[in-house]
Image (cartoon, helix red, strand yellow):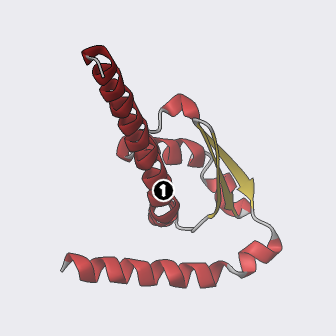
Amino acid sequence: MSFGKKCLNLLGLGALAYIGYKAWRYIIGIINISKELPVYLKNVIGESPSMNINVLFNRLTISLGFSSDTITSHPDIAEISLEYITRYYPIFRQDHVNIEVIQKTEAEQKTEPEVEEAIEEAEKVEEKSKN
């Protein structure tokens, strides 16, 4: 094999490794957002949202469900969430993240205490791991 082919193969492998690394960081970021954003919003706003994350190529769409009282009292929920995401996860650019705030249905509001208990347990485990 000639020197040119070796360099081309090395360049191709380097490009694949870089693309794989970027994809891995993107996936890990999505997983972390799905875990940490509800806890953050519960601390800031006082209500844990129902959350749905959709990814289409480089576009991230997050649907946050809150009660109607919370939506009227905090009209800037989308901006707060977007600021959190772009500050702590710089791989997600501000123009590639869509945040939709929707009203929770009655069934989702009834299951909210179960979700809050799970979040509180996760916070306790995190505190224990820090100590």
Residue located farthest toward the front when viewing the structure as drawn: 1
Name the residue type under label 1. Answer: Ile
Relative to 108, 12 lies left or right = left
| Residue 44 in view | no
SS for callout 1 = helix
- Residue density around tag 1, few if under 14, some if 14–19, many if 20 or more, within 10 Å: some
Residue 79 placed where, x, y %? 54, 41
Q: Residue furthest right?
A: 106
Report x, y in % for residue 47. 57, 68
Q: Nearer the viewer, residue 51 or 112?
A: 51
Question: At 61% across and 84% down in the image, what residue appears?
Answer: 114
Residue 102, given in percent of the width and then of the height, sits at: 73, 54
Q: Quadrant of residue 12?
A: top left
> Which quadrant would the N terminus be assigned to in this image?
top left
Q: Position of residue 2 (x, y in %)?
A: 28, 17
The residue under the point 33% across, 25% down is: 11
- The residue at the point 49 percent across, 59 percent down is 31
41 and 98: which is toward the camera: 98
In the image, residue 61 above or below residue 52: above
Compared to residue 29, the image places residue 110 above or below, namely below
Q: Is residue 94 left or right of residue 55?
A: left
Of residues 79 and 30, the one drawn nearer to the viewer in this rendering: 30
Q: Is residue 74 above or below residue 122?
A: above
- Residue 101 visible, this orientation: yes
Please report the residue visible at 53 percent of the width from the left and 85 percent of the height from the top: 117
Q: Which residue does the numbered mark 1 point to in the structure image?
A: 33
**Among all residues in the image, which is located at the extreme top?**
4
Quadrant in the rendering for residue 3: top left
